[in-house]
């Protein structure tokens, strides 16, 4: 059945598990950040929806592989079109091209960019397969919503196959300025594809401005609409702040592309329910009993060179060296989950983190007190929420981050209205959460000063800042993001 809304995303919209009898079951995702459920919820606003994703297959040609399945769950009925990719295709398209070539450039780590192993024909092939699947599923004039940088070429291919559809694209990572992005030898092909969209969306105005700069470095592109950006009353904002944002560009052939900035949020209601649950309160009681009168710092992220883990541990080491009054009274719980152990870059970061963590505990730890708990395994979300509630300070200091939802989870979990957030000004979330204690993770002095400020902050100030952040997180939650993005796409369709 043709679909009015087609979502193109690399992940399948469910968890595929094997039942007791060997049958395949499709269970709803339990992601606390709620992006997949939010996207599926949009199907309820159209007559029929479809989802395009990939699934690993030993032999893509086998007739036993179900390319199209019909799903019925709490979100209704929708079609899932699954692309069979071999393990080699997945490795080339996702782990090599996307993670070794694109990822470092998007996050401004030019020195980690690796061009040599990229198999560009395979990347094209996979993107073409996504475009073909979306073209098959889309009804006449349908809205096709494509997600993230590993599908950069889909808009261009889809426009060739189906010039009648409306194409929206959302970029979940940072988008760098031209002097960084143009390191990519495929830059013109990528940007040409994105300019085939009706709407291109980003988290924050800075990424919109960077995209326009990149587009203008290659094509005759004019900004025809611009709007002011709401500024904060906080004197020192994020390094990513912008005072105005382009909202429309026109190409040399007269075609218009709308540009949108809407930050991905979290499911605040879901997190608050977890924070108030009996299970969380029991866990919180145990954590607080163990903490006593001491101070708990909490850092949560993935093992990735963009997350600033080593810089953070070195700042903690400096804190212990210069603040002997804190010995025995402070503890850092540093959660750094290994995303992909097979990738050399991440393995190096993990080894460095383990070395620094061992040195800190070896130098400052005693039989009664270990200053650092270093955890590399995922923590169940209900347990993590209990630690969010117990942590006096959440310390989130990536070197670069498109948004960062961990800091928003911490704020939403603080149903008691207390707690301090120390946040890198290079995280997209810093543009929203201006009441956080901002820090520059590239500066020792800035990191040290931010920690001292957080540790010394009085309760009244903590609560004022937290109230402002909680209001921001709730007003721009995951549902607001979904609504905004769908509205942008629908406006583009009406303007045609």
Image (cartoon, rainbow, N blue to C red):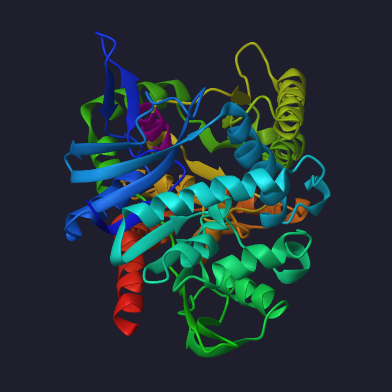
Res 358 → quadrant: top right
The residue that appears at 71% across and 64% down in the rendered structure is 187
**Magenta segment, prevailing SS (helix, strand or loop):** helix
Q: What is the span of residues highlighted in magenta in the rendered image?
A: 381-388
Magenta highlight on residue 383: yes
The residue that appears at 38% across and 63% down in the rendered structure is 468
Q: Is residue 239 visible?
A: no
In-image side of 433 versus 332 (left or right): left
Q: Can residue 27 be seen in this view?
A: yes
Q: Nearer the viewer, residue 126 or 491?
A: 126
Residue 390 to residue 1: above or below: above
Q: Which of 316 and 27 is in front in this view?
A: 27
The image shows a total of numbered marks equal to 0
Q: Which of 332 and 25 is in front in this view?
A: 25
Q: Nearer the viewer, residue 262 or 441?
A: 262
Q: Which image quadrant: the C terminus?
A: bottom left
Q: Position of residue 188 (x, y in %)?
A: 70, 67
Magenta highlight on residue 294: no
């Amino acid at each position: 059945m043709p679909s009015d809304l087609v979502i193109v995303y690399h992940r399948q919209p469910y968890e595929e598990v094997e039942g007791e009898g060997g049958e395949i079951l499709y269970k709803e995702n339990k992601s606390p950040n709620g992006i997949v459920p939010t996207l599926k919820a949009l199907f309820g606003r159209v007559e029929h929806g479809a989802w395009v994703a990939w699934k690993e297959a030993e032999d893509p040609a086998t007739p036993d592989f179900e390319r199209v399945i019909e799903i019925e769950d709490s979100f209704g009925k929708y079609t899932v079109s699954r692309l069979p990719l071999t393990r080699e295709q997945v490795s080339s398209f996702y782990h090599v091209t996307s993670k070794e070539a694109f990822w470092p450039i998007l996050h401004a780590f030019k020195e980690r960019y690796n061009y040599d192993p990229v198999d560009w024909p395979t990347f094209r092939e996979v993107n073409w397969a996504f475009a073909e699947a979306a073209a098959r599923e889309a009804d006449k004039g349908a809205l096709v919503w494509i997600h993230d940088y590993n599908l950069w070429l889909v808009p261009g291919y889809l426009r060739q196959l189906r010039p009648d559809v409306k194409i929206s694209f959302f970029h979940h990572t940072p988008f760098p300025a031209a002097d960084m992005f143009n390191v990519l030898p495929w830059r013109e092909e990528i940007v040409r594809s994105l300019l085939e969209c009706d709407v291109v969306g980003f988290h924050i105005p800075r990424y919109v401005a960077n995209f326009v700069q990149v587009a203008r470095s290659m094509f005759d592109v004019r900004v025809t609409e611009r709007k002011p950006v709401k500024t904060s009353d906080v004197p020192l904002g994020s390094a990513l702040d912008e005072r105005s944002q382009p909202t429309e560009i026109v190409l040399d052939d007269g075609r218009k592309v709308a540009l949108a900035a809407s930050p991905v949020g979290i499911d605040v209601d879901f997190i608050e329910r977890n924070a108030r649950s009996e299970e969380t309160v029991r866990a919180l009681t145990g954590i607080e009993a163990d903490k006593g009168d001491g101070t708990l710092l909490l850092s949560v992220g993935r093992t990735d060179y963009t997350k600033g883990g080593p810089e953070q541990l070195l700042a903690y080491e400096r804190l212990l060296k210069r603040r002997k009054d804190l010995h025995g009274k402070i503890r850092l719980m540093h959660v750094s989950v290994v995303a992909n152990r097979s990738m050399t870059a991440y393995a190096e970061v993990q080894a460095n983190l383990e070395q620094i963590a061992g040195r800190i505990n070896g130098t400052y730890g005693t039989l009664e007190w270990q200053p650092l708990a270093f955890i590399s395994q995922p923590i169940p979300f209900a347990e993590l929420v209990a630690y969010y509630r117990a942590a006096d300070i959440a310390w989130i200091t990536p070197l670069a981050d498109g948004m960062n939802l961990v800091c928003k989870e911490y704020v939403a979990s603080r149903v008691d209205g207390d707690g301090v957030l120390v946040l890198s000004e290079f995280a997209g979330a810093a543009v929203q959460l201006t009441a956080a204690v901002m820090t520059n993770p590239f500066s020792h002095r800035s990191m040290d000063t931010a920690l001292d400020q957080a540790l010394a902050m009085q309760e009244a100030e903590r609560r004022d800042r937290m109230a402002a952040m909680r209001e921001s997180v709730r007003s721009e939650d995951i549902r607001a993001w979904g609504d905004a993005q769908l509205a942008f796409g629908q406006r583009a369709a009406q303007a045609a």
